[in-house]
Image: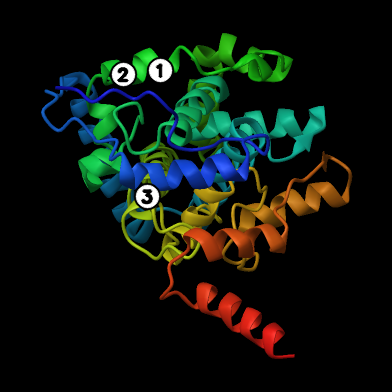
């Protein structure tokens, strides 16, 4: 029998109280809101074929990177990787899905363009799924429920029909803030035109016409290889960063701190912190720009006035949360208790 999901299992915004979040985390263990492992997945074979062809093409593109592609093409590919990942991390994730900061229209326009290059659905569709992921984390209503295993959380969820409870609970997600943004609304309405142009057409013709790259190299390296690489980097946040790492902030939830994912995904791998305090624009407590380049990107635009109202979490709130739900064997937990003991002896 499919277990009912009566309450959210996570939080989204600063307005979701800390007490509710702590209670929710403990309830995940006590009430054991389970995944329905008996649910029969309906595979979408069209998606299986398309993703298989994409990854085969990407492997050929990787080969061309080292054999025939021009240096300018390889550098252009790296630039598109950074640009499109930032469209996900700084754009649809931190700005629109979590409202962790605000942006003026020029920055919102730039981020929408970068997000369109990434081709991971429109801002509205991506943010809807991500809000579901946080609100019903690791349940049947989570689009990429990591309790179904690494492959499902990584890309398997895109190869099958959505679980009925995901569709049911998704109707209750408030997206009014997204539809009120005219730039986001424009992208949604014309995505079928903008996406092919930004993700596939321009990345292919720019190397050919600007530095005389071959059509084959232009198609397979900065277009197909780059697209598949970015997909897998962002998918790692859903898979590896929910399975492999430590839990200094909340030991009761699946998401973990994963340094490798944080580096590759420009700061999105500090996932135990992020699911504990999802409204923090940094998505992390510690780490520098090398392991959280997205934060540096946002800080730069805050410096020139394009980003503002950057939300953070106080050290006091972090320490109280670690003290209540953190991993007692982790250094972060021990440092807080050592600090408390020192204060008591003074």
Q: Where is residue 141 shown, x and y percent of the image?
A: 34, 26
Label 2: few (<14), some or many (≥20) within 10 Å? some
- Mark with earlier residue (1, 3): 1
Quadrant of residue 214 within the rendered picture: top left
Label 3 sits on residue: 236
CA–CA distance between discs 2 and 1?
Answer: 6 Å
Q: Residue at x 39, y 53 (%)?
A: 252
Of residues 168 and 86, the one drawn nearer to the viewer in this rendering: 168
Q: How is the image coloured?
A: rainbow
Residue 290 visible to the viewer: yes
Q: Where is residue 119 shown, x and y percent of the image?
A: 47, 29
Q: Name the mark on residue 165.
A: 2
Q: Secondary structure at mark 2?
A: helix
Q: Name the mark on residue 198.
A: none
Q: Where is residue 305 shown, x and y percent of the image?
A: 89, 43
For the residues labelled 2 and 1, say whether their Cβ atoms are less than 8 Å apart: yes
Q: Secondary structure at mark 3?
A: helix
Residue 81 visible to the viewer: no
Number of numbered tags placed on the structure image: 3
- Mark with earlier residue (2, 3): 2
Q: Is residue 199 above or below residue 307?
A: above
CA–CA distance between discs 2 and 3?
Answer: 24 Å
Q: Name the mark on residue 169.
A: 1
Label 3: few (<14), some or many (≥20) within 10 Å? many
For the residues labelled 2 and 3, say whether their Cβ atoms are less than 8 Å apart: no
Q: Is residue 265 above or below residue 279?
A: below
Q: Secondary structure at mark 1?
A: helix
CA–CA distance between discs 1 and 3?
Answer: 25 Å
Q: Residue at x 67, y 39 (%)?
A: 14
Q: Where is residue 279 shown, x and y percent of the image?
A: 64, 43
Furthest toward the bottom, the residue is: 346
Q: Residue at x 50, y 23 (%)?
A: 128
């Amino acid at each position: 029998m499919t277990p009912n999901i009566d309450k959210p299992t996570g939080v989204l915004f600063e307005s979701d109280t800390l007490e509710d979040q702590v209670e929710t985390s403990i309830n995940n263990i006590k009430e054991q809101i389970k995944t329905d492992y008996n649910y029969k997945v309906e595979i979408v074979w069209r998606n299986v074929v398309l993703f298989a062809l994409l990854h085969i093409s990407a492997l050929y593109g990787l080969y061309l990177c080292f054999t025939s592609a021009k240096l300018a093409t390889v550098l252009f590919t790296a630039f598109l990787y950074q640009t499109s990942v930032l469209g996900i991390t700084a754009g649809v994730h931190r700005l629109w899905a979590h409202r962790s900061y605000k942006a003026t229209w020029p920055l919102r326009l730039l981020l929408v363009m970068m997000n369109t290059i990434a081709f991971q659905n429109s801002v509205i569709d991506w943010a809807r799924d991500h809000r579901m992921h946080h609100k019903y984390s690791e349940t049947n209503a989570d689009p990429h429920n990591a309790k179904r295993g690494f492959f499902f959380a990584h890309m398997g969820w895109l190869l099958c029909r959505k679980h009925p409870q995901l569709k049911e609970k998704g109707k209750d997600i408030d997206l009014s803030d997204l539809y009120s943004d005219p730039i986001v609304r424009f992208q949604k309405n014309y995505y079928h035109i903008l996406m092919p142009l930004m993700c596939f057409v321009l990345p292919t013709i720019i190397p050919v016409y600007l530095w005389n790259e071959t059509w084959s190299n232009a198609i397979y390296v900065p277009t197909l290889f780059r697209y598949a690489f970015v997909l897998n980097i962002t998918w790692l946040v859903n898979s590896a960063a929910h399975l492999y790492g430590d839990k200094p902030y909340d030991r009761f939830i699946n998401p973990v701190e994963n340094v490798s994912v944080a580096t590759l995904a420009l700061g999105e791998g500090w996932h135990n912190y992020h699911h504990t305090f999802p409204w923090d624009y940094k998505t992390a407590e510690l780490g520098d720009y090398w392991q959280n380049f997205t934060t540096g990107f946002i800080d730069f635009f805050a410096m020139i006035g394009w980003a503002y109202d950057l939300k953070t979490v106080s050290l006091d709130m972090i320490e109280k949360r670690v003290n209540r739900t953190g991993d007692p064997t982790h250094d972060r937990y021990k440092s807080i208790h050592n600090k408390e003991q020192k204060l008591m002896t003074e």
